[in-house]
């Protein structure tokens, strides 16, 4: 078992090799790439992972790589390695979502701490994604009417209001509500709301 996978992206062979040796000794699985584009072309999803990228690289730098990771929705945490003069760029990367930036010559403990934060973030993201996928699978079992009732329920509307809006009887709403709760495996309305939030369903105000 390793601590997780670290993708090292740096155009400097000496830095790549030293990072690979350090991280391997620290118990990480390491993959090295000599450019951002090589990483994007060769990347295959891994559990519990983090990217360590130099801010200064030809063709596509570390900040542009981070932006491309976000654009593609890869969900990969990024730790930026930076020279002293690149700190403003590194701060930009942090504002865009980078986990940390480490100045050269970097301290081994600081680097590993940043990587550990990235891997922890990757683990959380993976868990959240799994929950969202499970919720979406349950939603897919609902009929159109049941989905409509669920949307009203998570918006906080009472049965009588739902019945009026859908032009059905309160009793029919109650039947649909029961089926929604059963198919969604929700024990309470608050359970249902949490599931909707996990699946990023837009909740309209109860008006």
Image: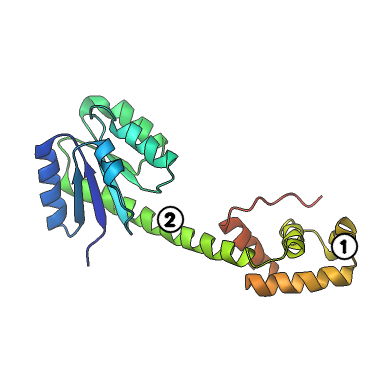
Report the disc number at residue 32: none
Inspect this view and state whether residue 8 appears: yes
Of label 2 and label 1, which has the lower sequence position?
2
Residue at point 29% right, 48% down? Answer: 43
123 vs 44, nearest the viewer: 44
Q: Position of residue 104 (x, y in %)?
A: 17, 35
Q: Position of residue 19 (x, y in %)?
A: 14, 46
In this view, 199 is above or below 42: below
The residue where tag 2 is placed is: 125
Give SS at disc 1.
helix
Q: Given the current orientation, which residue lies at the most extreme front position?
A: 41
In this view, 169 is above or below 89: below
Residue 27 appears in which quarter of the rendering? bottom left
Q: Position of residue 6 (x, y in %)?
A: 24, 51
Residue at point 66% right, 72% down? Answer: 183
The residue where tag 1 is placed is: 163
């Amino acid at each position: 078992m390793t601590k997780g996978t670290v993708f090292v992206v740096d155009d400097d062979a000496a830095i790549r090799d030293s990072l690979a040796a350090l991280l391997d000794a620290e118990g990480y699985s390491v993959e090295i790439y000599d450019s951002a584009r090589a990483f994007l072309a060769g990347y295959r999803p891994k559990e519990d992972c983090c990217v360590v990228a130099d801010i200064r690289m030809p063709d596509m730098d570390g900040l542009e790589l981070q932006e491309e990771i976000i654009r593609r929705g890869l969900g990969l945490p990024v730790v930026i390695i930076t020279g002293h003069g690149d700190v403003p760029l590194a701060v930009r990367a942090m504002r865009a979502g980078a986990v940390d930036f480490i100045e050269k010559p970097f301290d081994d403990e600081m680097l590993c701490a940043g990587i550990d934060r990235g891997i922890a973030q990757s683990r959380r993201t993976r868990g959240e994604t799994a929950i969202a996928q499970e919720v979406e699978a349950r939603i897919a079992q609902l009929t159109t009417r049941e989905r409509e009732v669920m949307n009203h329920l998570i918006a906080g509307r009472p049965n009588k209001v739902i019945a009026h809006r859908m032009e059905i009887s309160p009793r029919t709403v109650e039947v649909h509500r029961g089926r929604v709760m059963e198919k969604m495996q929700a024990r309470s309305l608050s359970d249902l709301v949490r599931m909707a939030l996990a699946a990023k369903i837009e909740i309209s105000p109860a008006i």
